[in-house]
Amino acid sequence: MRNKLTMSVTVRFFRQLAWLLESKCSLPDAVTAMQEAAADTDMKRLLEKLGKPNNDSIADWLCMAPEKFPEAVISALRHAEEREKIPESLEMLASDLFRKDVMEDGGRGVLFYPAALMMVMGMIGIIYSIFVLPAFKEMFESFGAELPWPTRMALTMGDWLAIPFAMLTCLVLATVMLTSFGKRASGLYRMGSELSQQLLAIIGYRQFRSQLVWGRIVRIAAASAQNSLDTAIMMRAAAANTLDAAEARILLQTTEGMAYKDLPEALLAMPKLPSFIREMVVIGKKTNRLGEALTFSGAMATELSLNKIGVMRQRFEVTAAIVMGLFVGFMLIAMYLPIFKIGQAVG
């Protein structure tokens, strides 16, 4: 079951708790400090639901509100308690959730521009098709003249473009709305996330998303290795907090390989591992600097992907502006050509 809280509250909850425990506060004292500092309704409700801990076990405390935290996350915290690495584990979870939320916002940003563009184009097309062009058609029929072919095309274009254009516009708008405002309803948010991935795949976003996922995997692996935590358990916790089905599948596939192999072998056995990550894993293993190699690879994968996404968004916006200009220009030509024809007919 996925986290029903907003990402902002979850990230703050894990990070505050990690810092308080790292400062040698006991769990009850840390909870008291968080309750005193809580400044918004969501955080207050979460802490009220959890109540006071009965012991120093964070996993037992979070089980008091199991609908808020996936079982895989609680299992990861139990594992961290056995290794005495609770602050490190909480910090990993907070960092992972924060980075994932940034990636999802990037996807919504890519979709927002075409949604706004299609709305404007649709409004222009509706106004011209319903109010402007039919008036010219009636005027020309009264003169016994024939409409120019651009005007005839504009009149008929609405008949076969209206339904698919309206459906696509509604689909994009629904995706943006669900992923922006449906975070409290996990079913709606998951639907919006899946729709966004399918729409983004059309414009080539998925290949960059895949690289971001690999960056996330190696970051989790690096942090787990550096803190002596079981990477597979931490991967399952990350997958439990993932809405993208494809991303969760890659994370779980990685954990399956780790059950039978050590970390470098499990990563190198993944068929779609990016080449530069593969190189860093091999060099890191040979030089006994695997953690540093994975950290560098994760940062590099994220940076490269975000740069490519930024370039793609700029190109898409320029292309969309050109399409918009051509559309408006065609509609203007379709509207003014009959005026010239009327002048010729009257003359």
Image (cartoon, rainbow, N blue to C red):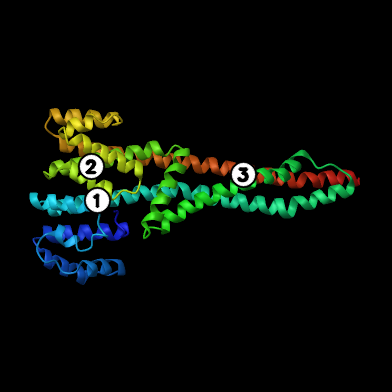
Q: Nearer the viewer, residue 163 or 335?
A: 163
User: Taking 246 as reference, is 56 above or below it?
Assistant: below
- Quadrant where the C terminus sits is top right
Question: Does residue 226 appear to the left or right of 248 in the view shown?
Answer: left
User: Taking 52 as reference, is 105 above or below it?
Assistant: above
Comes first in the chain, label 3 or label 2: 2
Q: Which SS class for mark 1?
A: helix
Comes first in the chain, label 2 or label 1: 1
Q: Nearer the viewer, residue 61 or 209?
A: 61
Q: Which SS class for mark 2?
A: helix
Spatial CA distance of label 3 from label 2 is 44 Å
Which amino acid type is shown beneath numbered disc 1? Ser
Q: Position of residue 202 (x, y in %)?
A: 48, 38
Residue 325 numbered tag? 3
Q: Residue at x 26, y 69 (%)?
A: 44
Mark 3 and mark 1 in contact (Cβ < 8 Å)? Answer: no
Q: Which residue is mark 2?
A: 219
Q: Which residue is mark 1?
A: 95
Q: Residues within 10 Å of mark 3 (few under 14, many from 20)?
A: few
Could one spot residue 4 in this view of the protein? yes
Q: Position of residue 340 (x, y in %)?
A: 82, 44
Q: Residue at x 29, y 52 (%)?
A: 98
Q: Which SS class for mark 3?
A: helix
Counting labels gives 3
Mark 1 and mark 2 in contact (Cβ < 8 Å)? Answer: yes
Q: Residue at x 27, y 66 (%)?
A: 43
Q: Position of residue 111 (x, y in %)?
A: 47, 47
Q: Position of residue 51 (x, y in %)?
A: 19, 69
